[in-house]
Image: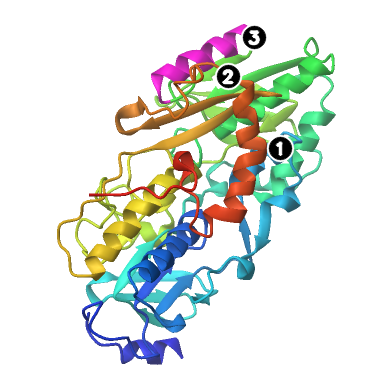
Amino acid sequence: MLANRAARTPALRSFSSRRLASTDAKVVVVGAGTAGLTAASQLQRALAKNRKTLAKEDFVIIDPAEYHYYQPGWTLVGSGLMDKKDTRRPMASLIPAGTTHIPESVKSFAPEKNEITLENGDQIKYEYLVVASGIQINWSGIKGLQEALVDSHSGVSSIYSYATADKAREDIEALRSGKAIFTQPSTPIKCAGAPQKVMWQAWDLYQRTDRSKTVKIEFWTGMPTMFSVPKYSEVLNALRIQRDIAGQFGQNLVAIDSANHKATFKKADGTEVTEEYTILHVTPPQGPADYIKSSPLADAAGWVDVDSGTLRHKKYSNVFSLGDASSLPTSKTAAAITAQAPVLVHNLVDVMNGKTDLVAKYDGYTSCPLLTGKGQLLLAEFKYGLEPKESFSNLFDQGKPQSAFYYLKTTLFPWAYFEHMLQGRWYGPKGFSKPSFS
């Protein structure tokens, strides 16, 4: 039916001229993850404030998932601080009222025709497009990983999926002696601090349960340092040395021999080294979704090619993007979306109203609440240029782990996420105060 509807969709029309026919889609949001739902909800609120209304069939959200996941909670699950069931909700319960949810996957984009083709063959025309499809986890990028994750005796786990997050907790808690290796790839990933959050929590557990002498922890990362922002990287590296955690930098995990508990790492120069492990926590390589990478919307690296300030596509003026799918040169986190969504929505509404000068600008703000042990958290906040942009520096030294910040991660953020952020009412450091632009 959608394919037939698309064939009758007229060319772009002025936002304020008249409502679209019920067979058309005016705004399409691809992705109902953190970025998609947050942007959709904020857009609804902005339109209502401007006394603009869209019929339910005019506002379309495309996402095939049955459930929506609070993925920042998976570090808590892997650390034994949260039940994984509390990190997901049925997708239908979170789709904003007044929108149409199409539970299908996108196959391709044809932005010259303002058209999307779905995997089932249906075609949808749009006037305005928001791409918030997230990042693709390439589980097959490490030989033997997929088989190891489903093997209860492999000692291999990952907090990067709902299915395996609790396996990380089980493996960490069960270890009594041996070597625990935690990995991070050199590719962009969801929350660059997550691979070591679960490592610090494991270290803390072994300290509290008299296993510090029998368990050796190692951090193997494809990155050159502990963290991209020098201020926080120095603190984390000093903590690593103080806690006697071996660090191997510039090393990407490429293969796992789970039968023999061996992991193979590769350096940039192609040399390889194989290490034995008792348990192995894996952060898989990640990248742009294949259907984004092969589309006209993508930049050379495969991300949706948007202006870093306005979040508008550099070529297609009716296309916007935010979150992990975008080319925005900042860390890919839920916190970043709290700053990106208001900018995107403000600029999109201006475009819909015929304005050409977009005043809202995103400065690259993102945050990584780094758990460093039970009751301790290093709150890393920064913007473009890896420059710290801290919310509490007048009260706390954010260059040190603080007990007060711990409860932001474990209590406040999960509550704010499901109760307010996805409904378009939460703006990160600004809380419930919507930012203004002029």
The label on residue 401 is 2
Q: Amino acid at mark 1?
A: Gly
Residue 300 lies left or right of residue 105; in this view the side is left
Of 346 and 251, which appears nearest the observer?
A: 346
The label on residue 159 is none
Q: Nearer the viewer, mark 3 or mark 1?
A: 1
For the point 35% across and 27% down, which residue is it?
Answer: 386
Query: What residue is disc 1 on?
Result: 78
Query: Residue 409, position in %: x, y?
Result: 62, 36
Instruction: Name above or below for residue 175 compared with residue 339.
Output: above
Tell me if label 3 and label 1 are in contact, CB under 8 Å: no
Q: Would residue 158 be seen by someone viewing this image from the given angle?
A: no
The label on residue 244 is 3
In whole angstroms, how far apart are the C-alphas of marks 3 and 1? 22 Å
Label 3 residue SS: loop
Q: Nearer the viewer, mark 3 or mark 2?
A: 2
What residue span does the magenta drawing correspond to? 228-242
Residues packed near mark 3 inside 10 Å, few (<14), some (14 to 19) or many (20 plus): some
For the point 40% across and 18% down, which residue is it?
Answer: 230
In whole angstroms, how far apart are the C-alphas of marks 3 and 2? 18 Å
Instruction: Name above or below for residue 44 compared with residue 435.
Output: below
Q: Amino acid at mark 2?
A: Pro
For the point 27% across and 52% down, which residue is it?
Answer: 306
Instruction: Name above or below for residue 68 compared with residue 182.
Output: below
In whole angstroms, how far apart are the C-alphas of marks 1 and 2? 20 Å
Q: Amino acid at mark 3?
A: Asp
Residue 37 lies left or right of residue 110; in this view the side is right
Examine the image and state in which quarter residue 76 appears: top right
Residue 6 lies left or right of residue 250; in this view the side is left
Q: Is residue 237 magenta?
A: yes
Examine the image and state in which quarter residue 349 appears: bottom left
